[in-house]
Image (cartoon, rainbow, N blue to C red):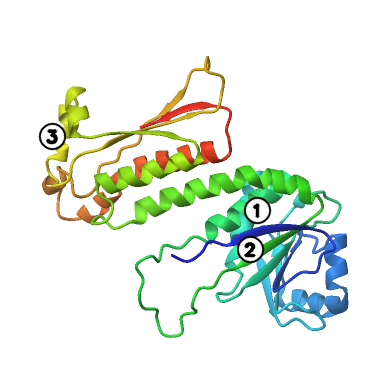
Amino acid sequence: MAEPVTIRFAKHGAAPKGVLIVLTDDTLTFGREAQKQLKPGLDGVKRAISADQFKGRLSSALDLIAPTNLDASRLVILGVGKGADLKAADYLKLGGVAFSKIPGGAREATILVDLPGLKVSPDFVAEMALGARLRSYVFDRYKTKRKEGEVEPVALTLTFLVADEAGTRRAWSAGEALADGVLLARNLVNEPSNVLDPPEFARRAQELTSVGVDVEVLGDAELAELGMGALLGVGQGSIKESRVVVMRWNGADAKTQPVAFIGKGVTFDTGGISIKPAAGMEDMKGDMGGAACVTGLMYALAARKAKVNAVGV
């Protein structure tokens, strides 16, 4: 599997490395820190903006390779539209767009978070980082050959230059846990059906004990004792035993009632597949997506030390 992008934070004024990404609003104005970084090549940047008729609309981007008089290997100008109107979801999207502009093979990139007359909060920067991390996802665990000319993936370090480094690190601690949970769910859904059978799914769920989740795995005997005949009937379609996984995270007071999440986890080798119509049968591989989401959710709650009692089944 390709390594996920490494997210780092540094204060404004630190030297950018690799690809440089700066923000501008729909007035095509740069923030004070961005102006400092771009000053040696600002005239060339303005000419490029004019020649491209770039308007700075939300999520639009202008890409300059080897910009004149700047140390950056590539400069990306990312439009944010009306900066004062941006919401958390907009920053999440901007992070994804920014990451998509980093060429394959790049080892370092820098996003200068700076807008004219506007202080971008640590929470909003964390949303950008989350968007970039999610956009970086690729499932290539079983890929053995690459297409002609396809760039070999390398580890990328993405640094955000921010006004409040300490505050952003604190905000990102929760965002990083959420990202890890989402990527866990994606990996489970993307695993081939001949790999992710019930015992293997349960084994991976048990790995959540590393972040403090209590995990209980019920096999055929326990399920029969509980009278779960319908589930066992479906499971008879597989040569592997059925499994039900119960995950518990207790982050709140013991008196607090838990929130329960139930996800469907019917893997492709179990019963019922044979009665589906042939057209689209392969889509039934995703019949375990609900359980994958619950597993990722329980991971995220525990990793961010959420003050909630939760049960995932």
The answer to whether the residues at label 2 and label 1 have Cβ atoms under 8 Å apart is yes
Q: Comparing marks 3 and 2, which lies closer to the viewer?
A: 3
Closest to the observer, 264 or 302: 302
Label 3 neighbour load within 10 Å: few <14, some 14-19, many 20+ = few
In 3D space, how far apart are the residues under numbered discs 2 and 1 (Cα atoms)? 9 Å
Check the image and report above or below for 216 versus 287.
Answer: above
User: Residue 52 occupies which quadrant of the picture?
Assistant: bottom right
Alpha carbon of mark 3 to alpha carbon of mark 2: how far? 49 Å
Q: Quadrant of the N terminus?
A: bottom left
Residue matched to label 2? 98
Image position of 211 (left or right of 282)? right
Q: For mark 3, what is the residue?
A: 233
**Element on which disc 1 rests:** helix
Q: The residue under label 1 is which amino acid type?
A: Met
The answer, for residue 309, to whether it is visible in the render is yes
- Kindly identify which numbered label has been placed on residue 128: 1
